[in-house]
Every structure is written in structure tokens, then in C-alpha cells.
Image (cartoon, rainbow, N blue to C red):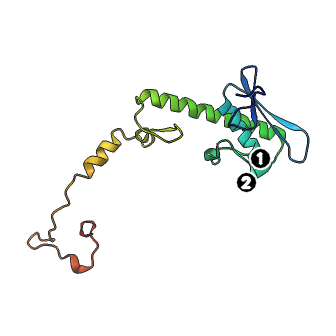
Amino acid sequence: MSTSGKHPSLHGIRSRNGKWVAEIREPRKSSRIWLGTYPTPEMAAAAYDVAALALRGCDASLNFPEFIGSYRVPEFPEPTLIRNAAGEAADMIKLCMEREDGQQADHGGNGVVLGNDEFIDEEAIFDMPNLLVNMAEGMMVSPPRPTSIDDRSPVDYSSGCDNLWSY
């Protein structure tokens, strides 16, 4: 981290006395909107993201663009509304971080680690323990024997009827 307190990769935040603060400059003004003080840089960055969306819309440069659909962005760019929405976004990020930490501890680290060290546990997402094992077993099932309705003659696949096993 640089001596200025700015985060090396997250923008709109800086470190002050061991905590992370977020603020944003209002467009075409010299004044800033104070977004709050947070214990983690991710929480402060999420607060900044909501404020940037409220003030700049689609032109906003975001720290976490993957959460854009999860943020509650105020309809009017009023400082009080922006501060409230920023706090909600920070709380959401905090819950996500706690949930990820808990899932990794609960599931012993089983899941997928993406290139940016993001952990995804498919079994927890779909609430289906042994999802991958069951899917692998399903691939080993043989197709059913083709039989007709009266079970005396084989099915005619040329009848134009689509059958899953005829492909």
C-alpha cells in the first residue's frame, strides 16, 4: 500500500487509522459526499460503487461490476440517499464475505476456485450434496431397450417421432 493510504487496486477508498473510508466527488462540483468508515477495503469499495452508480450511471468505473444487479441504487442523487444505499451495499458485501468464509469452513474447501481465487461451491448453491457424484453416475445409465406398446415388435424409429435415444 502506498504512503497516501490509497488502496493499490480499489478506487474511491483510502485507509485512515487502520480503517477504510469511502467518499466520492459530486459531478461538476468541488464538494464530496462522505460515504462512511468501514473495517474492510471491500466494504468501502462497495459503498463507493453504489455512489458512483447513483452519480454517474452506466459511465461509472466500478470496483465490483459483478454485483451491479445486487446493489440498491437510489433514484435521486441526493447525498443522504446515496449514503444510506452505500451503507446497505457495504453490509451486503460483509454478509457475502462471511458466507464465503463459513462455506469454505463448513464444506472443507470442496468446490471450484476460479482464476482470481474466488471460491464457488456448486453443491451448496444448488443445495444438492454429492451433486457431481450423482451426475457422474447418471452418465453410466444404459438407454432403455426399444420396445413397442404391445412389447412384441421393436419400435420403428423412422415414424417421425422424436426419441431421446434415437440421436
Disc 2 element = helix
Task: State the residue position of label 1.
Answer: 54
* Three-letter code for the amino acid on which mark 2 is drawn: Cys
Residue 165's image quarter? bottom left
Secondary-structure class at tag 1: helix
Q: Residues within 10 Å of mark 1 (few under 14, many from 20)?
A: many
Residue 81 horizontal/vertical position (percent): 79, 40
Residue at 62% x, 35% y: name it: 93
- Name the residue located 49 percent from the left edge and 41 percent from the top edge: 114
- Residue at 15%, 64% (x, y): give it: 145
Q: Residue furthest top?
A: 17
Q: Nearer the viewer, residue 134 or 15?
A: 15
Residue 100 lies, in percent from the top left, at 52, 32
- Looking at the rendered image, the quarter that the N terminus falls into is top right
Looking at the image, the residue that sits furthest to the left is 152
Q: Which residue is mark 2?
A: 58
Res 88 seen here = no
